[in-house]
Image (cartoon, coloured by chain):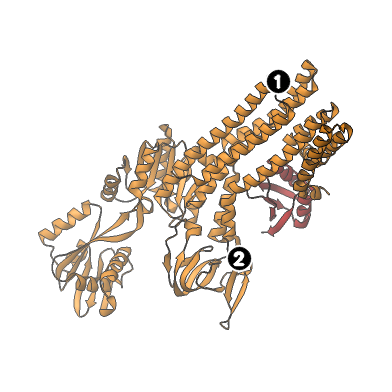
Amino acid sequence: MNKVTMQLETLSCPTCIKKIEGALTKTDGVESAKLLFNASKAKAEYDPEKVTSAELKSVVENLGYEVLKVKEA
Amino acid sequence: MIRFIFKQENKITLIAFILIAAGLILRFLNYTDAGNAALIGATIIAMLPIGIKAYQAIRMKLFSIELLVTIAVIGALFIGEYVESSIVTFLFLFGSYLEARTLERTRSSIKELTEMAPQEANLILADGSREVIDVDDVEIGNRIAILPGGMIPVDGKVLSGEAEVNEAAVSGESIPVSKMNGDQVLSGTILDSGYLEIEAEKVGDDTTFSKIIELVEEAQDSKSNAERFLDRFAQYYTPGVLVLSVIVWLITRDIHLAITFLVIACPGALVIGAPVSNVAGIGNGAKNGSLIKGGEVIEKLSKVDTLVFDKTGTLTKGRPEVTDFKVFEGDAIELAGLIGKLETASEHHLGRAVVEYAEEIADLSAYTMQQASGVKGRGIEGDINNRSIVAGNRKMLVENGIDIPDNIEAYALEREKKGNTTVFAAVDSKITVVISIADKIRDDAKEALETMRNNGIKHIVMLTGDNRHTAAAVAAELGIDEVHAELLPEDKVSHVKRLKEAGRIISMAGDGINDAPAIATADVGLAMGKGGTDISMETADVVLMADKLSQYAHALSLSKGTMRNMKQNIIIALVTVALLLVGVLLGGVNLAIGMFAHEASVLIVILNAMRLMKFKP
């Protein structure tokens, strides 16, 4: 199980939380996803055999949010 | 495409504004059709980002405010209210823009923290030359050079050099701390003057500084019960508003009234009011050296009526110091030199306290040690400057055949009753000095406890593993209500449980591993960050970064201030909705005024929360 932290553009609408969390969680291979609204960060745990961090980045981008930095741990 | 639209939101807002102005002028000049066209254009362009967000949310089965606005605007277009439809969409976008800007301010404290994070490091290569590298590339074991004004990039140990370091970023305390060989240095702290070479021990996300940032980030997003309630409330409230406005339409057959109702009932200020207070409150705490882990902790902390303290390291400094050096015969400076020199051979923590004291008043290098041997649980003896010195407890004296005169024994007993440990020192078999050593009470303890009492604390308890005498002495000095001494870690837990069962709301503060279970049991657990261990910091709900009890007092009144602020915000939100509702029923409040009041109330709650950033007890 890999972990990824994405720094997003500044989030201002509370509904973004559920939108982004929901979209990530629904992605195949993602175990859990959490959005830190105030820090504007998305964290996800995923199975590296099913999905890559670059794919997760594009999931967020397709919702219309800028991803500034991706950090894998 | 979607990203493009979101990115252009500010421009879209501006275009909508220009179109609205043009439309209104055209209509005023009686070019009604052209004016309406401009207004419809403004509505459509402004609806793009709003509609997309509403659609995205509905796909996640979420009823968002955007959805209410979208329906209202479509309704307004349908009945030909182009002025209102365009003004509502414009106000909504403009309001969101202001919201984002002000929200950013409430988050500024955490942003300041992350901006303080070190970016690069001066790596020392094998041949002694230096290379500047990215802080993420530093590896454990690397040698790093730190120059004056430079930031320490990683956690590590000083290998060489001497410096004054400002640790404000971590401890909130800006008085420089001196660092030399063997001392620990922390990432994010700044070298005031001097030069250091350190060995990296913790890098990347493992440094204390990174962990603090992560804790604060998580804290600002962990929700209080009130927030969770409001979240759930909003989940039902928003679709509820939709249903109600349909009912209003069915009864009155007035679409205009129904869509106005839809807009004024938007739950904006209600949803944002509570979290924004928490974010500002937690940010204020972090800046002042108390890390509060989330909205729930703030809520609980504000209700605490009983404080439980560990003694050693929490109420006291946690390291013994000489409190008195009583000379019965001879010269104080010479005696300090002789005894201090002898104690340099000791590994006991009392011995270290004596050395620290002696170094301050005498020059130990002027004394030479011929021989020294420590006796476990007794003391130490040896020859300094060719004189025979014995330092230790009563047993040590007896074993060396030294008598304790009555007056000296009486003095020692009196010191011991005051919570000191005594060390007798004899020169050439004659007792000349009694050294009192105690773990001193923290300088700010008394004042902090008093402040907290004035702030609603009814009962203060001290739990300690130390002996009864010492415990009683500390309790008396600080005016503590209830004391339990000679406890094991599990005894501390059962005392906390007992107090909880008596209906008290407990906040437990401690520092060591032995306190971690009690910290976890209490309603609110508090750990000392600097002298504390990782375990107690992780179990704790609040961490005091500079180990100052005044930070505890600050956190306590901050929690009350934050709760007050949150309640004000909820009231502002509810009153706005209520007033608008009355306004609609009595007539006079249309769609545009409703949207304006709605956005204004959102801004007011954010501005109200921003007051917390400057909160001082």
The one nearer the camera, B529 or B585, is: B585
Say which quadrant the C terminus of chain A sits in. Answer: bottom right
| Label 2 packing within 10 angstroms: few (<14), some (14-19), many (20+) | some
Horizontal and vertical percent position of residue B454: 37, 38
Q: Is residue B435 left or right of residue B612?
A: left
Q: Amino acid at mark 1?
A: Gly
The image shows residue B265 at horizontal and vertical percentages of 69, 28
Write the residue at 64% across / 27% down. B577
Residue located at (38% from left, 46% from top): B309
**View extreme (right): residue:** B33
In the drawing, does residue B295 fall left or right of residue B349? right
Q: Secondary structure at mark 2?
A: loop
B608 or B177, nearer to the observer = B608
Left or right: B256 in relation to B348: right
- Please tell me which residue is depicted at 15% across the width and 67% down the height of the picture: B431
Chain in orange in the render: B
Mark 1 or 2, nearer chain start:
2
Q: Which element is circle 1 on?
A: loop
Callout 1: few (<14), some (14-19), or many (20+) C-alpha neighbours within 10 Å?
A: few
Residue where numbered disc 2 is placed: B119
Q: For the point 77% across and 15% down, which residue is it? A: B251
Distance from label 1 to label 2 (Cα)?
Answer: 59 Å
Determine if residue B491 is in view.
no
Task: Name the residue furthest bottom.
Answer: B127
Left or right of A69, for residue B406: left
Could you tell me the amino acid type at mark 2?
Gln
Q: Colour of chain A?
A: red
Q: Looking at this view, name the residue that lies furthest to the top.
A: B251
- Chain hosting mark 2: B
Q: Quadrant of the N terminus of chain A?
A: bottom right
